[in-house]
Amino acid sequence: MDESMDSQKGVPPEVKPEDVKNDVADGKDELFHGPQKPGSIKEYVSKGNESSLSCGSAGGLDEAGLAGSRNNTTQTHCSNGQKTKRSSSPGPRPVKTTCVTTHLSNPKLTLNLSSSPRKGVSTPSDVEMLSPDSPVCTNLLITNSADHDGCAFADDSGIAKAQAMESQKFVKHSNSGSSSKERLPPVAMGTEDAELAACSGSSDMSQDFSGSQSFATFESVSFSLLNMDKGWLGTPIDELNRMPQCAPPLSHLKVMPNHTIMIRTDLLREGEVPAPYPSKFKDAWDDISVKIPCSEKNLFPMETEDGGGVQSRWELIHTALRGEFKSSLDVRDAILRYNTAHAKRWDFTALNLLCTEYLEHCEAQHLFEVTLPAMVDLALSAPRLCTMPIPLLKSRMNHSLTLSQEQISCLLANAFFCTFPRRNSRKSEYSNYPEINFYRLFEGSSPRKIEKLKTLLCYFRRITETRPKGLVTFTRQTLSSSPNWESSQTLLTRLHITCEGTIEDDGYGMLQVDFANRLVGGGVTGHGLVQEEIRFVINPELIVSRLFTEALECNECLIITGTEQYSKYSGYAESYKWKHSHKDETPRDDWQRRCTEIVAVDALRYRHFLEQFQPEKMTRELNKAYCGFFRNANGQHLSAVATGNWGCGAFGGDTRLKALIQLMAAAEAGRDVAYFTFGDAQLMRDVYEMHTFLTERQITVGRLYNLLHQYFSVVCKNCRTTRPDVTLYSFIYERVSSPASANTSDSVKDPAMSPVTSDCH
């Protein structure tokens, strides 16, 4: 994912168009940097269309938290004194409420009392510091056919103003001492509010409701104080399946028509370096195999007196790299000896800056005297290590390729020295393949390049000091037939969602999603340094996939099993920093692969926000995610999916839609989900609430799919503003809660059945 800020940060101010190649997160400039303060909570309460509330003594603390203060707390009952009536007219109507004093025993208790969708969970508009004398005033905005009673909230269109949204408060129902909590959904925002929320980050007003009908009771949507303090909600992550514990025994590793294996399987032993197969180099120079540098057909034009002639390029590479390296200029000169056509274009500024200004003298000395010579030995060992022709994983092809980590290191050393033939131009037969030679990584003075080079040189130092002993499998998977989404009776699976942690650290043993470019790796060998590129540089064995993987089609994914993490890092994009070497302790399976499974799935890029809600594009994303998640295995043996804001940010994806799409695809594939919002606490709450709402009502994947189609037909199709006034989640909440749809299945062919309308002008 090149040049795009992914799901953790905002888009950088300057982005080269040719480098923007991958999906990224909504432009978030603020992150949730850890758990909320103790006592900071958000509670929900609703009594359906009833207009009375009971105000809890401590703003919704659980029973244990209340035990010490119950005797010192005065409880009073709040009521607006009337029942609401169902209205057939659109637009929410405010209901009068009274304010009562609730004495709190903890003067420092912080309550999140605002339902405002604005970004940031700790801003003054989102929290209120309560003293023992602070009154708790609860304003309920629900549908009411009664007149406005002179309320300043109401307008002629029936859409509540932003002030109405700000005034909503949530408290615990304590009339009966019950621990259950209920939520009164807020109302839809007007166009002005929608635009304001859209500018405020990824929260995107996604919990607002359209107020065209009365709202059903939302039971049991609650936040645990313990979970909020930990920054996560839903199923504890340790209850989700991980590899290798959930995996069935592997069959014996053997060559099959759809599986190429480049090592001696009969000699595969734990703790031993796998032996290449076959024992002697077998050359191939065709359109189904990688053109390897050591091929005898890899020829180089030679200047002679008669003006013609060629020589072995591999011999020239051998001679050039065997020279002594005393500086980065020697490395440059060696590489350009067999890449003369690019001598005037290739720039080695980043490599030179690394060696002269960023590395300590002792580090630079070790690089030139030890690491680079060892890398040369490794690169030139290609005829001994990579003896079998490497098949190209072409489009519409279901095929697996298993290599040893040592073979991969040899190939990556050749990529570093830019030896792969016919891979430096987009006009060659590899125009639909990613770049593999590292020449773009050496150019320019960007700190990104420096940090990436540090990370990759850490890898090369490690593998030249100690030969790696495992295997890695690359599988191109094509989805031959997609699920019948419309009629699916599958229920959503379990969800763990968190605003803390990362996919690679906390999602260990799970199916980890790479927010990929269709050219896998995105800008890893260029300027890119977001989710995909970071994963590729800390797990450099992923980079070799670029050598043989053609651009992914809409129904394809790439699954990589067994790569090792060699570095730890901090930051993201411009703030990315290599920290130190990392020793990967992930256990190995019976094929001697690390139990790290990564799937590259590429999302669509949208020029306009509304186009992603077109049915064919939502279906495409569902099929793409399902392709990545599906395995022909029993569900109990499938690990959970570790994912996040796939296809968002610079790619224009809506985080809440993408979350639903991934939940649906994972459910259909029989997997639970661990979702990482990368610091967005509001998104964490929104998705958790929606998931809880849908699972408690046993909403199937098929019905949810139809609801997505309805949202497009009713709200988005004829909308003339950049964003609709009725958000996706508010539409789903209202439609599922609507009595009109309680006993009937949703249909995209009858948008008239929905009272929700889009106030687009």
Image: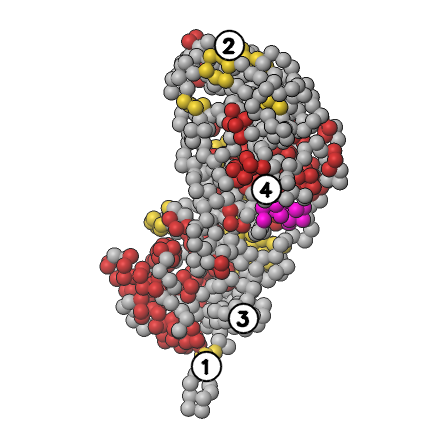
Cα gap from disc 3 to disc 2, whole angstroms: 77 Å
Camera-nearest label, 3 or 4: 4
Residue that label 4 marks: 723
Say above or below: 711 vs 584. above
Q: CA distance from mark 4 to mark 1?
A: 58 Å
Where is 564 relative to 443, above or below? above
Residue that mark 1 sits on: 301
Comparing 168 with 275, the one in front is 168
Q: Earlier in the sequence, mark 3 or mark 4?
A: 3
Q: Quadrant of the C terminus?
A: top right
Report the span colored magenta: 608-620
> Label 3 belongs to which residue?
427
Tell me which residue sits at (54%, 67%) in the image. 430
Query: Of tags 2 and 4, which is closer to the observer?
Result: 4
Element type at mark 2: loop
Residue type at numbered disc 4: Arg
